[in-house]
Amino acid sequence: MKLADPVLEKLLQKAYSAERAAAFAYIGHANSLRDPAAKIAVKQIEEDEWRHRENVLGLMQRYGVPVSRRYEIRYYLIGRIISASCHVIGRFMPFFFAGKLESGNVCEYFVMLRRFHSLGIEEHDEMLYEMGMKEKEHEIYFLDQIRTSRLLPFFQRLFSWGAGTSANDVDLQRKRPVEESADYCKGYKAPEKTAE
C-alpha cells in the first residue's frame, strides 16, 4: 500500500535519518562523560534511538517510502559533528541540547499517528505511542541532569526549552491512553513538502 500523504512520508524520512544523527550524538556524549551511571543512561538512550530507526524503517518499507538520500547525508553530518563537539563544549550543553532535541522529537511520533489515522490506519498506534513516550522520557532525563545548573535560566530564555518549557504537551505523570494520544501535539507544525 502506498501512502497518499506526502507530509507523512516526509515525517517518516526525516525521523529515520534524524534517529541515526541522535544515536551518533549520544555515542560522543556518553564517551565524553566521567560518571559511570550517566554513561550507562546515555548509552541506553542511544540504543533506544537505533531501535526507533529500525521501527521507522519498517513502516517506510511497508508503505513504499524511499529513504531520503538528502536527509541521510545531512543528518549523518549533523550527528557526527555533535558527537565530536561533546568532547569540547563541557557538560551542560550536551545535556541541554539533547533535551531540547528530544522535546521536539516527541511530537513527530504523535503527528505520525494522527496522519496515519487520517488514512484509516490505526495498527501502528501502539508502536508510535511508545516511541513518543520514550522520547519524552529522554527529554526528562536530560533536563534532570541540568535542572540545578546556573546556566539553565539563561539557556532556557535563549532557546525556549527547560524547566517548565517544552516543545510538547506530554505529561508522563498523567499519560493519556493510546486511544486518546492523537490529541497530543495539536500545535506541532509538520513539514509541507516531500523530501527528495
Image: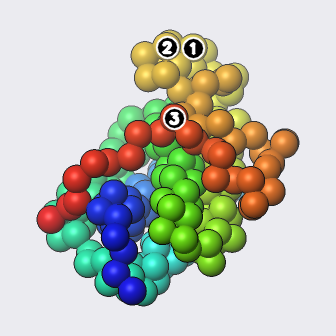
Would you say residue 117 is visible in this rendering? Answer: yes
Query: Residue shown at 79%/50% (left/top)?
Result: 176
Tag 2, which secondary structure?
helix
Q: Which residue is mark 1?
A: 153
45 vs 6, left or right, is right
State how far apart marks 3 and 2 are (Cα). Answer: 21 Å
| Mark 2 or 1: the one toward you | 2
Whether residue 166 is situated above or below residue 68 in the rendered picture: above
Q: Amino acid at mark 1?
A: Pro
Q: Tell which circle, 3 or 2, labels the residue nearer the N-terminal end.
A: 2
Q: Which residue is mark 3?
A: 187
Would you say residue 151 is visible in this rendering? Answer: no
Query: Residue shown at 75%/40% (left/top)?
Result: 171
Image spot of residue 88 (x, y percent) = 36, 40
Q: Which mark is residue 157?
A: 2
Q: Tell which circle, 3 or 1, labels the residue nearer the N-terminal end.
A: 1
Query: Residue shown at 49%/22% (left/top)?
Result: 160
Residues at badges 2 and 1 in contact (C-beta under 8 Å)? Answer: yes
